[in-house]
Image: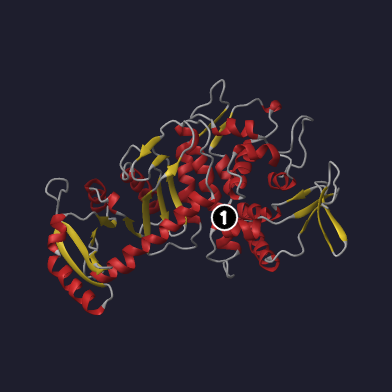
Amino acid sequence: MPTECSADLFGFAPVEGREVVAGFDGGTITSDAGALLLGAADRAIGLIDRLAACFRDVRRAEWIEHEVATLVGQRVFGIALGYEDLNDHDHLRHDPMMAVLAGKLTARREDCAPVAGKSTLNRLELSQLEPTRYHKISHNPIAIKRLFVDQFLEAHKRAPSQIILDLDATDDPVHGMQEGRFFHGYYDCYCYLPLYVLCGRDLLVAKLRPASMDAAAGAVEEVARLVAHIRRRWPQVRILVRADSGFARDELMAWCEANGVDYLLGLAKNDRLVAEIASELARAEVKSRRTGKPARYFKEFKWTTRRSWSRERRIVAKAEFTSGEANPRFVVTSLKRTECKPKYLYEKLYCARGEMENRIKECQLDLYADRTSTATLRANQLRLWFASMAYVLLCAVRRIGLQHTKFANATCGTIRLKFLKIGALVRISVRRIKIAMASGCPVAQTWGEAAVLLNAAASARGSPA
């Protein structure tokens, strides 16, 4: 017979003659004790305070319970821990770890928790560009966009000789009646079409756009802003823009050519392009059918469109025959043959952009911001920025704390699962806050090493220059 339970205890199958019961009576316990690493990473790179400085608060000081820095930090930390929905914060506001991260153990008012609930956070996300009677908190989008680039620049001790800016657009499905929702035939869903720009693992742009526009819409403006910002700090750095065929637009290529920026872009195939490599495709087919393996040859040539391009450009073609059919591919580039031979340019340089797609999956799948409620495009852009800042924070944990471990290339999801979601008993006394984490934590030693490195980086940042 199953063990009977009281209203507070739940019975389970006995073990070695002992009854097994469970109840929610353990006291001040958290399941997110590893978030201490997030707090240390934030102190090491100064993210939350600088993000909070992008907001303006005109609320009456004597009525404020939760400062903007608390609200911003709570939202970013929550997403990093996997709580993308604002409703989660009605429970998280009582979580001792969120209070520790906020640096605020008790509320000043009896009817409040140490950190904010969903309604207060919702007012933050509905902030306008300028304060109004009903929106006392406003935000500065330009300052937020600059912060992404500043974080990237500060992560380098010295200027690199070359950087690659990877551009991509992807679907961001919505499940409510948000402003700007649009059905996209390719993705077969209602979605947004955000533009991302990354340099390696560093996220530089997360721009939310309706799915009704071209994939390259706004790319020139974002690249121009990034290049100007980067060159102010690194005037000699060489910049390469890399993207798929959705960005092979004359406007973007012409801007790069006029401003000393290289580009390497995919190019959609058409009959004229395929005709240029007809003999190479025939050779590849003969070789593939003889060996039973895929075969490929490369060719480069000058080419232009009949109307849309303003000049001829270098094309590198891959003439491939695989799985019993032709698989031609094309890229257009400003790089000279003396710098980059066709085979290397395609296989090593262009195909490496696949890693950037994995980074976008981290942002979208591991740190997915709430898209279920009715909200304006501006509010959803702010949510996307919060999720993107959570990605930046997790990258800082990996880059600073896990750099010498087997987790140096771990995804954000792995970092969250292994290092943040740790159960602990929180004991608060007059002199200290003791967070007693699970003794059986499998990454306890690595976690401790990460904590030492992150705290050292935080101390170095706080020390005088």
Residue in the foreground of this view, choosing between 365 and 324 = 324
| Res. 460 visible in picture | no
Residue in the foreground of this view, choosing between 216 and 258 = 216
Left or right, 19 with respect to 333, comes to: right
| Residue under the image location 11 percent in, 48 percent down | 306
Q: Which residue is mark 1?
A: 394
SS at circle 1: helix
The image quadrant that residue 405 belongs to is bottom right
Which residue of the protein is positioned furthest toward the top in this rendering? 133
The location of residue 401, given as percent across then percent down, is 61, 63
| Residue under the image location 62 percent in, 57 percent down | 417
Give the colouring mode of the picture.
secondary structure
The location of residue 250, given as percent across then percent down, is 22, 48
Which amino acid lies under the numbered mark 1 shown in the image of this protein? Leu
The location of residue 297, given as percent across then percent down, is 21, 71
| Residue under the image location 45 percent in, 43 percent down | 145
The image quadrant that residue 121 belongs to is top right
Left or right, 18 with respect to 297, comes to: right
Q: Please determine whether, in this image, residue 98 is positioned above or below residue 265.
A: above
Q: Residues within 10 Å of mark 1 (few under 14, many from 20)?
A: many
Which residue of the protein is positioned furthest toward the bottom in this rendering? 291
The location of residue 420, given as percent across then percent down, is 65, 56
Residue in the foreground of this view, choosing between 254 and 280 = 280
| Residue under the image location 62 percent in, 43 percent down | 73
Q: Please determine whether, in this image, residue 149 is positioned above or below residue 214.
A: below
Which residue of the protein is positioned furthest toward the front in this rendering? 1
